[in-house]
Image (cartoon, grey):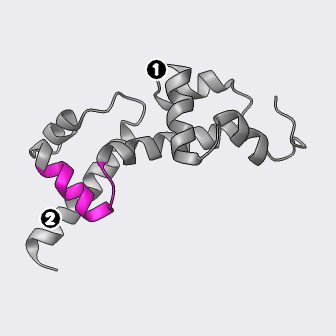
Amino acid sequence: MNEKQTSGKALAKAAEIYMRAHSSERFSLEKMAKSLYVNGSYLLRTFKHHTGMTPLYYHHRVRCEKAKELLVQTDMEISRIGEVSGYVTPSHFTHVFRKMEGCTPRAYRKQYRTGSGGQES
């Protein structure tokens, strides 16, 4: 691996760490790029090259992973889970979750909730 590939891989990893730390905040490629001291379009290209996905897609993936944990492990209301995960409206949360996971948050909770006998709380 040459120096450019190594630095690109390190940048992609730094971007992943940044997005995990800021997952509940509104996504801003420019803000993230500024904090990583690079140009936004360079960050976008480099991240996609090294991960196979756009930073926005990765950001939504991180939010959905957090939401899935809360759906299964807590009795928190679904709208509140969306809010805690960083979504401004319940409808946007449901839309993105369905797109990413193939089902609604409610259906996910019902399917994966352990010890609930399939009953939703």
Q: Position of residue 18 (x, y in %)?
A: 30, 44
How crowded pointer 2 is (Cα within 10 Å; few <14, some 14-19, many 20+) is rated as few
Q: Is residue 106 visible?
A: yes
* Residue 7 disc label: 2
In the image, residue 60 sits, relative to residue 75, either above or below, namely below
Rendering quarter of residue 33: top left
Of the 4 image quadrants, the one containing the C terminus is top right
Rendering quarter of residue 107: top right
**Secondary structure beneath label 1:** loop
**Residue identifier under label 1:** 88
Q: Residue at x 64, y 42 (%)?
A: 103
| Residue 53 is one of the magenta-drawn residues | yes
Q: Residue at x 42, y 31 (%)?
A: 24
- Disc 1 marks a residue whose amino acid type is Val
In the image, residue 2 sits, relative to residue 73, either above or below, namely below
Q: Residue at x 67, y 37 (%)?
A: 71
The magenta region covers 42-54
Q: Residue at x 17, y 39 (%)?
A: 35
Q: Position of residue 53 (x, y in %)?
A: 33, 55
Q: Is residue 83 visible?
A: no
Q: Main secondary structure of the magenta part?
A: helix
Q: Position of residue 65 (x, y in %)?
A: 54, 46
**Secondary structure beneath label 2:** helix
Question: Relative to the observer, which residue lies in front, 38 or 95?
Answer: 95
How crowded pointer 1 is (Cα within 10 Å; few <14, some 14-19, many 20+) is rated as some
> Which of the two marks, 1 or 2, is nearer to us in this view?
1
Q: Which residue occupies the extreme bottom position in the image? A: 1
